[in-house]
């Protein structure tokens, strides 16, 4: 398959012209509000594919989205969030899209999101890249830091008014645009991780293989990470995440796995384990369900060390059943 740049906003694939920028959104047991968000997202002009990771597919949802020109694909949570990305990206890139924007089911973008991202894609040309907006955490009402790293140290990026694309090293998948060339060079998202640190792993892989990521300061995506709450411990202000126990398992397990996998080449791969340690203190000091969450973290660390990956139900069925019972 040959690919050449045709004109701004399109690529030529084997002589035919296809839109450059497509969109992919992942569903999981969506509410009516989520579907309204997706219909609004589809109205921005970029062709939208929805991958449903719910346990059962929905003909009603497929029909409602189809009436708005939105394609529906049921994935049944195969490979978790990583599997949904892979199935959707493979389909869109096979159709000739030069880049695809990734979204959660509750993602809401500004009216200029696709225009600005398209401009950035055209500016970067045929190279392998991923671009993300600045992320505004609605829970704590401030922007998340954007990080640049050489694999050994990190620095936080600063943005001036009117700044354009800036190289960075880590992107959240939500709101991110990945080019076809980047996906081909980096390969599929790691489905063994299932959920949590899937985008961290992809960022580390890109850093190791020389695929540059960028932040687009002109764009902001509002996002909620967990159910963050602010606490004071004397003069110190601390944040608790309040993720459920099963998410604690995945975070701890995948963080440990990434450390073992990447730390020989990228010492910063140890950072997710520092986050795990911080979460232990958060649970002990501020959160409910301490026993279940700490059990999830402990089992996750062990499984990360042993390389026992995949969905929790397969890796630790007893723990999964216990956590499901609450």
Image (spheres, rainbow, N blue to C red):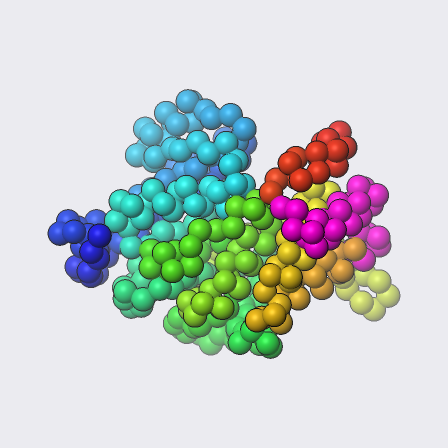
Indicate whether residue 306 is drawn in magenta.
yes
Which x, y percent locates residue 19?
A: 24, 50
Figure disc tally: 0
**Which residue ends up furthest to the top in the rendered image?**
59
Asked which quadrant contains residue 20, the reply is bottom left
Residue at image point 84% right, 53% down = 284
Nearest the eye: 306 or 234? 306
Q: In this view, does 1 lie above or below 133?
A: above
| Rendering coords of residue 31 (x, y %) | 53, 31
Is 325 placed above or below 296 here?
above
Q: Does residue 1 belong to the magenta stretch?
A: no
Q: In this view, does 275 lie to the left or right of 225?
A: right
Q: Residue furthest front?
A: 306
Task: Look at the image and give the residue range highlighted in magenta.
Answer: 281-309
Which quadrant of the view contains residue 143?
bottom right
Q: Which residue is drawn at 60% across and 61% down?
A: 261
Residue 263 in sight here: yes
Which quarter of the figure is the C terminus placed in? top right
In the rendered structure, the answer to whether residue 221 lies left or right of residue 325 reads: left
Residue 241 seen anywhere in this rendered image of the structure: no
**Most distant residue in the right direction:** 234
> Going 54% across and 41% down the picture, which residue do you hit?
80
Q: Which of 88 and 218 is in front in this view?
A: 88
Decide whether the magenta segment is chiefly helix, strand or loop: helix
Residue 281 position in % (x across, y down): 81, 57
| Image position of 265 (left or right of 112) | right
């Amino acid at each position: 398959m040959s690919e050449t740049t045709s004109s701004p906003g399109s690529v030529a694939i084997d002589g035919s012209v296809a839109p450059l920028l497509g969109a992919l959104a992942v569903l999981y047991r969506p509410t009516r509000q989520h579907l309204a968000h997706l219909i609004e997202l589809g109205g921005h002009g970029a062709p939208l594919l929805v991958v449903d990771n719910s346990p059962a597919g929905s003909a009603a949802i497929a029909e409602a989205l189809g009436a708005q020109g939105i394609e529906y694909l049921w994935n049944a949570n195969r490979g978790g969030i990583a599997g949904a990305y892979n199935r959707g990206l493979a389909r869109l890139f096979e159709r000739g899209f030069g880049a695809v924007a990734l979204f959660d089911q509750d993602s809401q973008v500004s009216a200029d999101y696709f225009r600005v991202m398209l401009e950035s894609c055209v500016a970067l040309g045929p190279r392998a890249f991923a671009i993300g907006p600045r992320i505004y955490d609605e829970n704590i009402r401030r922007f998340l830091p954007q990080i640049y790293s050489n694999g050994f140290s990190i620095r936080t990026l600063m943005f001036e008014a009117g700044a354009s694309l800036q190289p960075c090293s880590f992107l959240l998948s939500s709101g991110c645009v990945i080019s076809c060339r980047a996906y081909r060079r980096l390969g599929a998202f790691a489905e063994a991780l299932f959920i949590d640190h899937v985008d961290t792993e992809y960022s580390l892989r890109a850093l190791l293989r020389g695929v540059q990521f960028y932040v687009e300061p002109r764009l902001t995506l509002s996002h909620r990470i967990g159910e963050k709450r602010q606490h004071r411990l004397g003069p110190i202000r601390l944040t608790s995440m309040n993720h459920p126990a099963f998410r604690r398992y995945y975070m701890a397990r995948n963080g440990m796995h990434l450390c073992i996998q990447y730390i020989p080449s990228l010492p910063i791969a140890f950072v997710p384990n520092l986050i795990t340690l911080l979460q232990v203190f958060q649970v002990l000091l501020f959160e409910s369900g301490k026993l279940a969450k700490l059990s999830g973290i402990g089992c996750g660390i062990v499984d990360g060390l042993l390389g026992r990956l995949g969905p929790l139900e397969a890796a630790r069925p007893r723990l999964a059943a216990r956590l499901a019972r609450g």
